[in-house]
Structure formats: structure tokens, C-alpha cells
Amino acid sequence: HVRDRLVAGEDDPRCEICGSILRTGTVLFGDPLPQQTLQAAVRVSQLCDVMLVVGSSLVVNPAARLPRIAREHGASLIVINRTPTPLDAEADVLIEGEAGPTLASIVTRLDAVRSEDQRL
């Protein structure tokens, strides 16, 4: 329904009940994280083998604590960012670069390795 309104050219669709401008399901700076979502993220951080952090300054809490939680529970940490972060010294792999091109390059290389493995 909202998508149809956007496609029709409505720039800032408003809620039909309260009149507020609708926005995506993202958390903006200064907004609290939904508790259930944060609790799930902490559980996953405690259980993961590798945490990949992409394009984050790692200074905004509580999300910035998740990589430390993962490290405390034995996970490897990979940080891809264009600027330094407070966790760079703790990262097992540190890649300085833009998220999009860096991830595209990694996928290309993994595809090449997978293709080579299938030929063997």
C-alpha cells in the first residue's frame, strides 16, 4: 500500500491514522534499539564464530559493543571500514576501504576459489 503511494509520486507518505510521516524500519541516530532486537543480536554475537563489521565507526552504543561480545566469546573479528575504529587493534582481519567495492572484491575472489575447487 505505501509502496504504491511512493510509486504514484507521493514524496512523504503520511500515516493514515496519526498523520506522521512514515519512515522505513531502520533505527536512526538517537533512536533506541528495540529491546527484543538488541537481545537477539547479543545472543548471536555470543554464538558466532566470525563477526564481520562493515562500514561502522564502532562508537555508537549499544551496537558498538556487539563485536566485543563476539570476541569475548571466542569469535574472530573482521573489520571493513574506510576510517579507523576503536577495535582495529583487536581485529583478526582489518581492511581499510569502502564497503561496497571491498565486499564486491571479496565475493569475486570467493567465487573464483569456489570455481577452482569445483574443478579439482
Image (cartoon, helix red, strand yellow):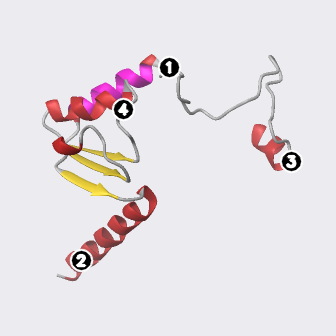
Q: Amino acid at mark 4?
A: Val
Question: Start and end of the magenta stretch?
Answer: 36-46
Q: Earlier in the sequence, mark 2 or mark 4?
A: 4
Label pair 2/3, CB-CB below 8 angstroms:
no
Reading the image, the residue beneath label 3 is 9
Task: Classify mark 3: residues with Cα within 10 Å, few (<14), some (14-19) or many (20+).
Answer: few
Q: Earlier in the sequence, mark 4 or mark 3?
A: 3
Q: Look at the image and tell me in which quarter the C terminus lies.
A: bottom left
Reading the image, the residue beneath label 2 is 118
Classify mark 4: helix, strand or loop: loop
Magenta stretch, main secondary structure class: helix
Q: Nearer the viewer, residue 26 or 30?
A: 30
Q: Amino acid at mark 1?
A: Pro
Classify mark 2: helix, strand or loop: helix
Reading the image, the residue beneath label 4 is 59
Q: Amino acid at mark 3?
A: Gly
Classify mark 1: helix, strand or loop: loop
Disc 1 vs disc 2: which is toward the camera?
A: 1
Q: Earlier in the sequence, mark 4 or mark 1?
A: 1
Label pair 4/3, CB-CB below 8 angstroms:
no
- Judge from the rendering whether residue 63 lies leftward or rightward of residue 69; answer left or right: right
Q: Separation of disc 4 and disc 3 at Cα?
A: 37 Å
Reading the image, the residue beneath label 1 is 32
Classify mark 3: helix, strand or loop: loop
